[in-house]
Image (spheres, coloured by chain):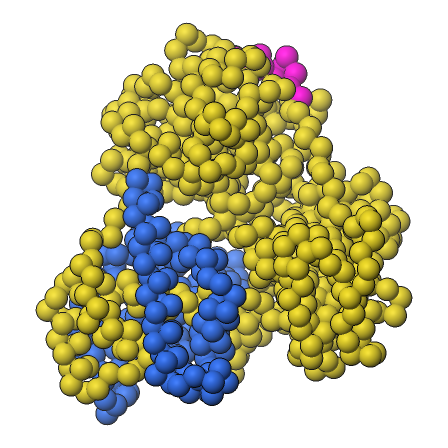
């Protein structure tokens, strides 16, 4: 909580002018004195100075527009990497190992077929028999930039939902692929097409058709073409490259900044294009031409079917054999209360605004969350006494709609009904200041939560979870360690000290806490169980197999 | 650690922005910030053998960044407008106390920037992204330097107010 700042125009003016080095010597001396002697002023300065520093970062984040030549370059192109590349002269020994100038990796056919989520270590490159292939750049420090969320079945091999893309070149011979970038942008690609993934927020299409939907959090996503750059300003648009390399851009909704690029890759002509318009970028005649709008969009993203989680009796029996305290299966039709299958206690109560009932529905055997302006969640009304006195495990299946930062489930002290602090949080972690891969699953443990709200121990999964796919998550807390399992495999085990403690706790699912719509999870959730014991690696793997190997 | 070279570069690439942000609190000129950041990177590489991978990288790196800030201060001792060591220490302590809140404010900032209209955002981007001087921006936009500073100051104040308001509305959050 920030301490209240009493508005003081003179102080604000002093600080703002300090940022731009507009102070006189006398003013600076006074400024320095106040920094030393006035704690409230110093705090305010630190807040303002930090925001000023963040402005440099935030406003520099619009990725560079690339020329076709640059886009095909093997070299990582982000400004941050370029900055560190400049260090090569000084720290040569390091950088030789990090930014090699070698060629792209060979195509390595991989025969993993994962239908219910990605392997934790997806292959960097892949191909299928039809000739659709992805060539990842050879870069030691490249991180996953996007994940394949859907194909129309015309590709095979490793290029199935869940395949993680690092920067590299994708050649799609036929069919359709839908890719979600970590930034949140979603691109649907219709083959034949050549498409390069530049980073988590930029791509280049050399031929073929693409449609893009860019939510607010991915604003600034860039789609380059051989002759143009489309900087998205929060919209849905489609792009088609004809045989001459000219580009047509159709803005389906919202607005884009469209640039015609010169030979040096810089903008020659630019135009804000609003919906519903189609503009042709003619690179030979150096002009942008308004085109007539056809009745059907040139390319559109496809809706992804919401498949239910198929659970066998054997799976259910196995859960029951481990004697959980809570087992929510979401099989009942009651929209207000979720039945605990193993006890008369700890049924969950559903909270959803009447004005936005779509925010949380219990249907088709699962809980279905959508983001709304109002709070919506379900939670236990009765507390779980002494839950953290010993070992316990939380198991759930999720099918997220996207990679947005969102809390799936939290356990909070009964003494804090508004869930200001948590004993545990399980979430998709995207926007944090912690160190992890964006889009990873996070398991947080904090004891005692009331006093240790600034601290916490985290276990993160590796890599991106996959939107629109069912994923199995198990969080195990023991007296001296915590473990996170992802799709049946141990993702991370972390040592704990002073992990146990007294107190009564409650569970809340769907967002961080009841008071606001912060970190709302969007997607489906099923088969939630809480066990008063630590599941073993074998038991977790068994549950995963019982669902995947139907 | 399997390959310290790669691991070091990976960690540095992940955290360079946070280090730059930290240094910016003590060093106002952007080119000076970059200079201190590069010196910090070299220092970190020299000390990397002593880094415990079980611990968080950023707090470890920030300690060295602070030493580099002090070193840099000595290098530019003849320049005017230098903070005393006492002030730097007070700022560092205040920043540590507010670390959690500052991270929240940064998330709020992302939201507040989306509220800007295109014209204002473009002005700020020119100022912050490509470091256009206010004088050259004023010439381009046909305003006086004074008027442009007024506008920039106002925009920054609006952003700070928006962040304050966003943080206050999230006060019930974890």
Q: Is residue A426 visible?
A: no
Quarter of the view holding residue A278: bottom right
Asked if residue A452 is positioned above or below residue B76 in the image, the reply reads above
Q: Chain A is drawn in which colour?
A: yellow
Q: Is residue A259 visible?
A: yes
Residue A317's quadrant in the figure?
A: top right
- In this rendering, the count of numbered labels is 0
Q: Which residue is drawn at 74% across and 81% down?
A: A263
Region rendered in magenta: A310-323
Q: Where is residue A125 in the image (x, y as percent from the top left)?
A: 73, 54
* Residue A293 in picture, x, y percent from top left: 80, 56
Residue at x-position 49% and y-position 76%: B126
A392 displayed left or right of B172: right
Query: Can you say whether A438 is above or below A15 in the image?
Result: above
Residue A318 colored in magenta in the image: yes
Q: Nearer the viewer, residue A354 or A82?
A: A354
The one nearer the camera, A283 or A545, is A283
- Residue A140 versus residue B162: which sits nearer the camera? B162
Which secondary structure class fits the magenta region best? helix
- Quadrant containing the C terminus of chain A is top right
- Please identify which colour was used for chain B in the image: blue
**Residue A396 relative to residue A123: left or right:** left
Q: In the displayed orientation, state which residue is furthest to the left.
A: A37
Q: Give the farthest residue toward the top.
A: A344
- Residue A52 x/y as whole percent: 36, 68
Q: Where is residue A355 in the image (x, y as percent from the top left)?
A: 49, 28
- Res. A366 image quadrant: top right
Identify which residue is drawn at 25% across, 90% down.
B79
């Amino acid at each position: 909580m920030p301490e209240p700042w009493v508005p003081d125009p003179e102080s604000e003016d002093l600080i703002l002018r300090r940022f731009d080095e507009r102070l006189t010597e006398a003013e600076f001396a006074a400024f320095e004195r106040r920094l030393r002697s006035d704690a409230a002023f110093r705090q305010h300065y630190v807040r303002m100075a930090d925001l000023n520093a963040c402005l440099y970062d935030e406003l520099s984040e619009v990725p560079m527009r690339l020329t076709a030549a640059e886009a095909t370059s093997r070299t990582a192109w982000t400004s941050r990497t370029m900055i560190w590349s400049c260090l090569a002269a000084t720290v040569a020994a390091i950088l030789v190992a990090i930014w090699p100038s070698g060629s792209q990796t060979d195509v390595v056919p991989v025969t993993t077929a994962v239908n219910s989520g990605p392997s934790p270590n997806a292959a960097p490159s892949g191909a299928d028999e039809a000739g659709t292939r992805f060539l990842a750049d050879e870069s030691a420090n490249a991180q996953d930039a996007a994940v394949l969320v859907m194909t129309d079945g015309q590709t095979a091999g490793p290029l199935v939902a869940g395949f993680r893309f690092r920067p590299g070149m994708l050649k799609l011979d036929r069919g359709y692929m839908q890719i979600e970038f970590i930034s949140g942008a979603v691109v649907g690609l219709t083959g034949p097409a050549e498409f390069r993934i530049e980073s988590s927020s930029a791509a280049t299409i050399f031929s073929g058709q693409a449609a893009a939907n860019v939510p607010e959090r991915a604003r600034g996503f860039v789609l380059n073409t051989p002759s143009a750059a489309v900087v998205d300003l929060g919209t849905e648009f489609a792009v088609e490259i004809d045989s001459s390399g000219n580009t047509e851009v159709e803005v389906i909704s919202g607005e884009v900044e469209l640039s015609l690029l010169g030979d040096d890759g810089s903008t020659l002509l630019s135009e804000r294009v609003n919906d519903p318009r189609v503009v042709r970028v003619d690179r030979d005649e150096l002009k942008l031409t308004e085109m007539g709008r056809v009745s059907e969009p040139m390319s559109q993203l496809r809706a992804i079917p919401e498949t239910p989680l198929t659970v066998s009796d054997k799976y259910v029996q196995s859960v029951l054999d481990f004697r959980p305290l809570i087992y929510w299966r979401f099989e009942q039709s009651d929209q207000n209360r979720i039945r605990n299958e193993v006890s008369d206690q700890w049924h969950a109560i559903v909270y959803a605004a009447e004005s936005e009932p779509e925010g949380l529905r219990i249907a088709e055997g699962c809980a279905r969350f959508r983001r709304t302006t109002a709070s919506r969640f379900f939670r236990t009304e009765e507390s779980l006494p002494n839950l953290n006195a010993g070992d316990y495990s939380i198991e759930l299946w999720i099918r997220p709609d996207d990679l947005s930062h969102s809390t799936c489930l939290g356990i909070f002290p009964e003494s804090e009904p508004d869930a200001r602090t948590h004993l545990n949080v399980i979430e998709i972690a995207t926007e944090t200041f912690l160190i992890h891969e964006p889009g990873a699953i996070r398991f947080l443990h904090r004891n005692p939560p009331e006093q240790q709200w600034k601290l916490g121990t985290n276990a993160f999964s590796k890599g991106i979870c996959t939107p629109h796919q069912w994923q199995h998550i198990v969080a195990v807390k023991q007296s001296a360690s915590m473990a996170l399992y992802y799709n049946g495999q141990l993702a991370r085990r972390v040592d704990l000290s002073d992990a146990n403690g007294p107190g009564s706790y409650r569970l809340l699912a769907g967002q961080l806490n009841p008071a606001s719509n912060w970190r709302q999870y969007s997607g489906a959730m099923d088969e939630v169980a809480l066990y008063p014991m630590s599941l073993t690696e074998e038991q977790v793997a068994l549950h995963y197999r019982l669902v995947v190997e139907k | 650690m399997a390959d310290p070279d790669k691991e070091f570069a990976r960690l540095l690439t992940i955290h360079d922005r946070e280090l730059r942000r930290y240094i910016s609190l003590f060093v106002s000129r952007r080119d000076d910030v970059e200079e201190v950041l590069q010196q910090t990177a070299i220092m970190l590489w020299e000390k990397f053998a002593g880094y415990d991978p079980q611990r968080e990288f950023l707090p470890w790196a920030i300690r060295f960044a602070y030493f580099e800030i002090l070193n840099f201060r000595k290098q530019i001792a003849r320049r005017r407008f230098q903070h005393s060591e006492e002030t730097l220490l007070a700022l560092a302590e205040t920043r540590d106390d507010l670390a959690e809140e500052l991270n929240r404010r940064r998330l709020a900032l992302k939201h507040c920037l989306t509220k800007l209209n295109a014209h204002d955002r473009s002005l700020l981007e020119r100022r912050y992204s490509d470091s256009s001087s206010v004088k050259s921006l004023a010439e381009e936009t046909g305003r006086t330097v004074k008027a442009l500073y007024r506008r920039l100051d106002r925009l920054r104040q609006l952003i700070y107010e928006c962040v304050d308001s966003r943080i206050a509305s999230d006060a019930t959050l974890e």
